[in-house]
Image: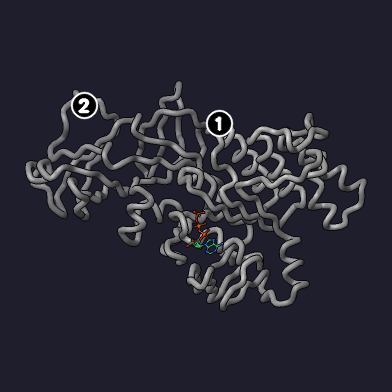
Amino acid sequence: MTQRQNLLELKELRVDRGGVPVLDIPSFSLYQNEFVSLIGPNGAGKSTLLLSVLGLMKCQTGTVSYRGSVIGSQAQWLDLRRRTAMVLQDPLLFDATVFDNVASGLNIRGMGRGEIKKRVATYLERFNLAHMAQRSARKLSGGEARRVSLARAFAVEPEVIFFDEPFANLDPPTRQALTDDMDGIIRDRGIAAILVTHDQSEALRMSQRIVVMNGGRIVQQGTPAEVMNHPVNEFVANFVGMETILEGEVVSNNDQQMAVVVAGREVDTVGDVEPGARVYCCIRPENVTISVSHPDQKSSARNLYAGRVTDVASMGPFLRLQLDCGFPLTAYVTRESFAKLELCEGKEVYASFKATSVHLIRRRAA
Ligand SMILES: Nc1ncnc2c1ncn2[C@@H]1O[C@H](COP(=O)(O)OP(=O)(O)OP(=O)(O)O)[C@@H](O)[C@H]1O
């Protein structure tokens, strides 16, 4: 197997703000072509981490390395910033035309006029802004302003891009369209990215790795399925909401009645994704029904699996069951049902859920 190339590396990074420690990262790496999402509650240190990576925040200790070299001098920080781009929640556009805003990063980098014109035209086109190139950036809607800010960031053709909540407060269709555009460019150009987001489905859809932060520390990191299905502690479990997230591949779609293969088993779902696509099937634990004998034919649940209880944990009025059905599945049962069904660890059960209970998210290519 080829070794993944380490692009950006943080070591022993500690940051204080207002005299209070807010970031403590013993080590963190971003690899070539990798898309990482940072999630965590307000004040977890996500934005501070992005600012520190670019040398925009004074660190008490620690190093930032890029392509194996520790960044030390001002010239090295400047070089790192020129190889990267950052998109913030507030688009922060200049009082100038859309064209001039998209060109601004290229002007700073000293690119020739002819080349700037060509480059800006390409990115205006990609973000569907060509028709408003001469409009004042001050007269744009929120969604249009975000497009300009994305076009400006991508126009410098960065090696790494950082996003700090770039789509917050946008309506879902606009958000979806922008993430699709952004995802396309990131893949085409092999750009590495770190996204700070409060939208977990966005993190699932876009990322190869999710990093969960709390109190200035990384509390868990892994593939979306690892983090969602195997939270390392109660904080992560509560924060991610403990859905079951299964990696699968669509094998058929007949009029939106779809079948997805997960760990060799078929899961029926409803949606519109083409066969061959890689997806996540997300199933909320409250939508899984448990029985100890084979349910009768009248059940409307299309998905039925024999499985075994592997773990039982208390969740307030419910008990949370971890099941092994050939794939991991989480279910909630009331204490009353738990007693009535005589459930316990090791018990053989049947788990069922409706096709409409499966929420599908398309996976990014690895
Ligand atoms: N200008 C500042 N001065 C002092 N402390 C600050 C300042 N900005 C942020 N902090 C503190 O630093 C810590 C980390 O904040 P940061 O903005 O990095 O968190 P975050 O995870 O990005 O939060 P959010 O999701 O709310 O944007 C918090 O405790 C915050 O109160």
Where is residue 273? Give x, y as percent.
Answer: 50, 31
Which residue position holds label 1?
A: 173
Residue at 62% in and 44% down: 183
Residue at disc 2, secondary structure: loop
Relative vertical location of residue 336 with respect to residue 156 in this rendering, above or below: above
Q: How many marks?
A: 2
Task: Evaluate whether residue 132 shows in this view.
Answer: yes
Task: Determine the residue located farthest toward the top in the rendered image.
Answer: 255
Q: Nearer the viewer, residue 140 or 269?
A: 140
Q: Nearer the viewer, mark 2 or mark 1?
A: 1
On the picture, is 352 further left or further right than 86? left
Q: Position of residue 208 (x, y in %)?
A: 52, 53
Residue assigned mark 2: 299
Find numbered disc 1 in the image and state the secondary structure of the residue it sits on: helix
Q: Residue at x 55, y 51 (%)?
A: 366
Picture quarter containing residue 271? top left
Q: Position of residue 56 (x, y in %)?
A: 65, 65
Q: Nearer the viewer, residue 197 or 337?
A: 197
